[in-house]
Amino acid sequence: IAVIDFGIKHNILNLLLKTNFEIIVFPITFDFERILKIRPVGIFLSNGPGDPKATYNNYKMKLNMLFNTDIPIFGICLGHQILALAHGAKTVKMHHGHRGANHPVKNLKQNNVEITVQNHGYVVQKKSISKKITVTHSSLFDGTIAGIKIKNKPFFSVQYHPESSPGPQDSRYLFNNFIENIQNCAKKK
């Protein structure tokens, strides 16, 4: 699995290592053509600081190389925002942001609530969602988008931190979903 590092948290790497796939971490400045030449079975877009639009615009050509593949992609936080931007959505700076533990998020597919940890000051703008994107999760505090899936691609992401362990581990299943996407894509080859 190729991990694109925008400022990754150590526990994300711990959870990815438990998948039994080889994990290779690449800085955003790395040559993405070389990443694709090693033929990763999955791509992980990490969390990180800063304005997602500025980051995406600075590395747009490189990132779009990844999005033009059918390699399964999983993004968290900044990775989520970049995935949304690459598929026609916009991001906006929040007045206060979401910080800390115990943020309820509704999983719209499963129709249940996950208790999450969040740390972001930008959000994917609802009214900018393109027809390429399905919203999968929503904040129960303010209705902001907390997760998306890209239609017709094995790409998904969440705004919150499923790797955190403040108590409930309601969202750890997302790592399993990523592995299932990888295995499903391998079966098609």
Image (cartoon, rainbow, N blue to C red):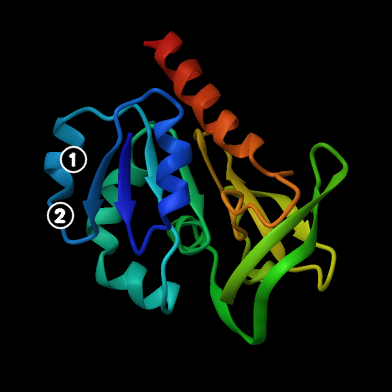
> Which quadrant is the C terminus positioned in?
top left
**Which residue is located at x 44 percent, y 9 percent?**
187
- Report the Cα–Cα distance between label 2 and label 1: 8 Å
Compared across the picture, whether 178 is left or right of 45 comes to right
- Local SS, label 2: loop
Compared across the picture, whether 80 is left or right of 14 comes to right
**Which residue is located at x 55 percent, y 36 percent?**
175
Residue indicated by mark 2: 30
Residue 105's spot in the image, x, y percent? 78, 57
Compared across the picture, whether 64 is left or right of 102 comes to left
- Quadrant location of residue 53? bottom left
- Quadrant location of residue 43? top left
Please name whichever residue, 150 or 72, is drawn nearer the observer in this view of the structure. Answer: 72
Residue 125's spot in the image, x, y percent? 64, 72
Image height of 80 relative to 151, above or below: below
Residue 36's spot in the image, x, y percent? 20, 36
Image height of 175 relative to 185, above or below: below
**Which residue is located at x 77 percent, y 58 percent?**
138
- Quadrant location of residue 50? bottom left
The count of marks equals: 2
Give the amino acid type for the residue marked by disc 2 in the picture. Answer: Phe
The answer to whether the residue labelled 2 contacts the one labelled 1, judged by CB atoms less than 8 Å apart, is yes
Residue density around tag 2, few if under 14, some if 14–19, many if 20 or more, within 10 Å: few
Compared across the picture, whether 22 is left or right of 179 comes to left
Residue indicated by mark 1: 35
Residue 155's spot in the image, x, y percent? 50, 40
Residue density around tag 1, few if under 14, some if 14–19, many if 20 or more, within 10 Å: some
Return the mark for residue 169: none
